[in-house]
Amino acid sequence: MRIVVTNCNTTQEMTEEIVRGARAAAGPGTTVTGLTPSWGPESAEGWLDSYLSAAAVLDALRTYEGPPYDAVVMAGFGEHGREGARELLDVPVVDITEAAAHLACLLGRRYGVVTTLERSCGQIEDSLETAGVGRNCVAVVGTGLGVLDLGDTDRTEAAFLAAAERARAAGAEVLVLGCAGMTGLQRVVGEKLGVPVVDGVGAAVRLAESLVGLGLTTSRAGSYAKPVRKRREWGRGVG
């Protein structure tokens, strides 16, 4: 089985970190390939970045020329584009936001999300509502760190733990890493917090494997029907 994991930004180092986390979570026989958009924001933080990122990721998937794959994991927490990717592709598309939230709901009655900048919180809340898992989320808390700051491991851990306490005080029984760049942090903070910590990348990879293994893919009956055939302009080219 081959899974393509798409970064939501153009930072190749982050793609490599996400792929490492995805491979660590994948089962035997699963190959993980990373995909970095050739254009778009270097980090997705806010509505403008998110919409730009969505178009860039869809373009990257549209023009992909690598080995055939069985599923796609979209590694942008709260970012847009998952619905468009499901229309575009004939394989299962699993978004890390949905995946993490669904698994969190299996582990506790209420969960909280710890993310990067506060400006991303509303966007994540909307994404969870759209996915139908918003009612179980008691808090989306920012650490005050930008996506590109996450490489500072000690600073990230301290900021995460402080934000996690706020989420727990709000009633969270399970915590979710609210950024693909936080992948791997769950192993460091889980014991210290005393509650399950869900990494969206790992959750999405495992769910993608399950869908492929069960022979399931996106329904074409209605919402995710194939796009209407028409002329579309993709940047300077024609699609």
Image (cartoon, rainbow, N blue to C red):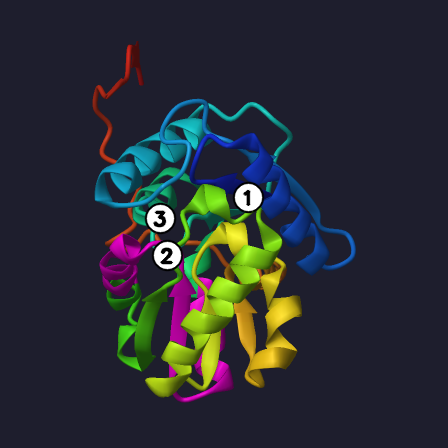
**Residue 126: x and y, percent?**
23, 61
The residue that label 3 is drawn on is: 82
The residue that label 1 is drawn on is: 5
Looking at the rendering, the stretch of residues picked out in magenta corresponds to: 99-127
Q: Residue furthest right?
A: 28
Q: Amino acid at mark 3?
A: Arg
Q: Does residue 90 show up?
A: no
Task: Name above or below for residue 132 compared with residue 91.
Answer: below
Task: Name above or below for residue 43 compared with residue 136.
Answer: above
**Residue 158: x and y, percent?**
53, 65
The secondary structure that dominates the magenta segment is helix
Check contact, mark 3 vs mark 1: CB within 8 A.
no
Residue at 65% across, 53% down: 21
Instruction: Determine crowd level at label 2: few under 14, some 14-19, many 20+ residues with C-alpha closer than 10 A.
Output: some
Q: Is residue 195 left or right of residue 171?
A: right
**Residue 44: x and y, percent?**
36, 41
3D distance between C-alphas at marks 3 and 1: 13 Å
Task: Name above or below for residue 157 compared with residue 60.
Answer: below
Q: Is residue 101 magenta?
A: yes
Q: Earlier in the sequence, mark 3 or mark 2?
A: 3
Q: Is residue 107 magenta?
A: yes
Q: Amino acid at mark 1?
A: Val
Q: Earlier in the sequence, mark 3 or mark 1?
A: 1
Q: Does residue 77 show up?
A: yes
Q: Residue furthest top?
A: 236
Mark 3: which secondary structure?
A: helix
The residue that label 2 is drawn on is: 144
